[in-house]
Structures are given as structure tokens and as C-alpha cells.
Amino acid sequence: MTHAGPVTTLFERAVREGRIKDDPEQRDVLPILDRIVQGLAARPQPSGNGGGWLGRLFGAAAPTAAAPRGLYLWGGVGRGKSMLMDLTMQAAPIEAKRRVHFHAFMQEVQAGLTAARRTGAQDVVRPVAERIAAETRLLCFDEMQITDIADAMIVGRLFQLLFDAGVTVVTTSNRVPEDLYKHGLNRQLFLPFIALIRDRLDVVHLDSIRDHRQGRRTGDQVWFVPADAAARRELDAVWDDLTDCADPGQLRLAVNGRMVVLPGGCDRVARASFDDLCSRALGPADYLAIAQALDVLIIDDIPRLGSQNFDAARRFVTLVDTLYEARVRLIASAAADPEELYVKGTGSFEFQRTASRLHEMRDATWGRVGGMAAG
């Protein structure tokens, strides 16, 4: 019997332990991921000055083996794309690897371009690409999508330089490559990037008949009162139901040169407390980035609102408005039902609109995709 590859081994272990459900369409992708991980393992590690990527920065010889061909894995919501990418990250036996949401990555790139322009560099893309390549051999992206013309105009050259430098890319997307930046301004300038994806990555459609998130909590309770230990157990169950990541971690989003970090993030689902979201100095741009990155947000411990936490209450109103406009599913524990959260004091009258929106968002049909918004 053929020895299972490293990603397949992790997949089968997760199935045996009941952490994921077996899926034949996902299994079809495993040989490609095994090939990538084995190819990365076969490349000699950088040496000198302590090894690792620091060795490359300080002049160690670059690996001689060719970088393994990467993967563009696309398909509908809830098919397990992020879970497969997580297993790849876990299996890759190298230190120079990174998993990042594509939106956050491009925010970092744009900040790097701005810094390069300040130095007077004629070619601002190359130093950014060289810095990334010096630190990263495997680059895993969640949710590749191009909506910004500034990103669209530079991704082709950026990724050409990364590929040429030996970076292997594994990315997920809800869209076939030809639908990226669809109808975007000056799209003809973007088309070479699509050709580059086809040339340098295996493009695979994960066409599972099973939506691993469909039906989970659809129509069930999504607002838990009071925010006690029982409510936390319910939200723990929701989190377990809605996430398939092998190793859920933080959600990190770069916004205007800062990092917005939520404690839990997996496959377009995130979890954070009210304090994480509203007691910190976050603003509309931060909430917009969160909404764009998510289909479901779970919030723990929403308190009663009033003069004692007026600034946090204002941020909560902004957050709800942003989630509402983006049709992000909200699941939460709170001290009271929406209409009882903010009953007196400055801002309580205006909060009636927010309470109305919260009630609408509790409906089973709320979300981007039918009942439960999913990704």
C-alpha cells in the first residue's frame, strides 16, 4: 500500500478523531497538497547566521531545488478550502511559511510600496517582493479577491517576482481566476495576472456537494441572554459547528498601517468579546475591514449600555451598522435583549434603530447566503 503523504496523514487523523467529516472531493485535493509539502521538504534549508530565513537575509546561498508548483483552490462557501490550507501549513516542515488573509496581505504590501516611494526608489514593487521572499518560502492566502484598483495594478508584477524568487503560493478563493476583479476599472491591465495564475499554479475547483457549514445553526437561537456560563457554552458549540480549520488562530487584518486582531478566526468566521471590538480605539475603517473578511461574527459578553460605557456603545452602534450593511451574520451573548440593552441616557433614543437592526439580523434568513452566511 502506498504510504500516505504528510497532508493526507493529518487529514485522516482529523477524520478519525471526529474533528472533520470525510469528503471525497477534499480527498481529491490531498495528493496536490502532499506534493507541495514534499517538494518544500526536499529543498535544502538556508544555512549560515543561525539558519532559517535570517541566513538568506545575511547572504546565505539560496536553495538550489526548484520551488514546488503552488495551488489556487476555488469553490463555493463552506467546502473546506481553508481547512485544507491549514493542514498544508501544519504539514510543511519549514519555518519560512506564513498564512495570512489576502486582504491583510495587500494592506501590508501597499504600506511597503508607500515606504519604498519615500526612499525615492524607481521600482517600488521589487524591494517589497524581495523582503517577502527573504522571509517566506510558503505563502498561504485565505480568500484571494481583488476589489481595489490599486491592488489590481500591482499584483501581476508582485507575484511574478515572488514566483521567480522561489516562493510557493497556496491560495483559496470563492471565484474562478477569470472572475477576479470582474468588471473592474482598467481590467485589461489586470488580465496578465490571471494568465500568471494559470501558468504558475494548479487551479482546482473544490466542487463538493456538501456545504460543511450549511444547516449549522440556521434558524437556531443566535442571541443568548444573559451572558453567563451557559451562554458561553452555547457560543462554544456554535464556534465548533461553524469552523472547520484544523488549527484556528487569530484573525489579523492590516488597516491603515495598524493590525486589528480578533482572538479567534477561521474560514470567514471570527470570535471576539465586546471589549475586544468596542472598548478599544477602533473606528469605521476597522469595522469595514472586519466585515469584508467575514461571513459570521460571534461576540461574547455584550453588556448593558449607557453613560458608563458611552464610547464603547457608540462603537457598538457603528459595528452593528457595518455588519448590517455587509449582511454579516451576528451571533452573540448579551446582558439583555436588544431593546433592553440601552434604555436610558444620551444615545438611548438613537439606539432604537440599532435594536431594530439587531432583531432583523436574528432572523433565520439573514446573511449573505440564504439562512446562514457562510464562507
Image (cartoon, grey):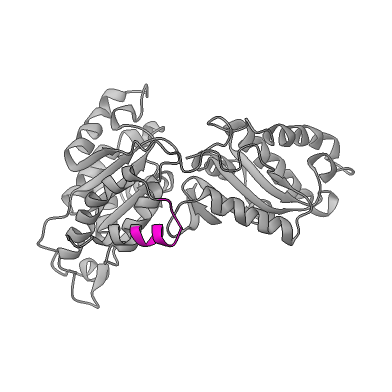
Vertical comparison of 240 with 207: above or below = below
Q: Is residue 304 magenta?
A: no
Q: Is residue 290 left or right of residue 190?
A: right
User: Between residues 334 and 49, which one lies in front from this camera angle?
Assistant: 334
User: Between residues 33 and 356, which one lies in front from this camera angle?
Assistant: 33
x, y percent for residue 291: 55, 40
Disc count in the image?
Answer: 0
Q: Residue furthest right?
A: 344
x, y percent for residue 82: 40, 48
Give the residues in magenta: 12-21
Residue at (38, 31) in percent of width and height: 149
Q: Is residue 123 visible?
A: no
x, y percent for residue 281: 64, 53
Vertical comparison of 231 with 113: above or below = below
Q: Residue furthest left?
A: 64
User: Between residues 78 and 272, which one lies in front from this camera angle?
Assistant: 78
x, y percent for residue 223: 72, 45
Q: Is residue 4 left or right of residue 232?
A: left
Residue at (80, 52) in percent of width and height: 335
Q: Is residue 45 visible?
A: yes
Residue at (66, 41) in percent of width and height: 220
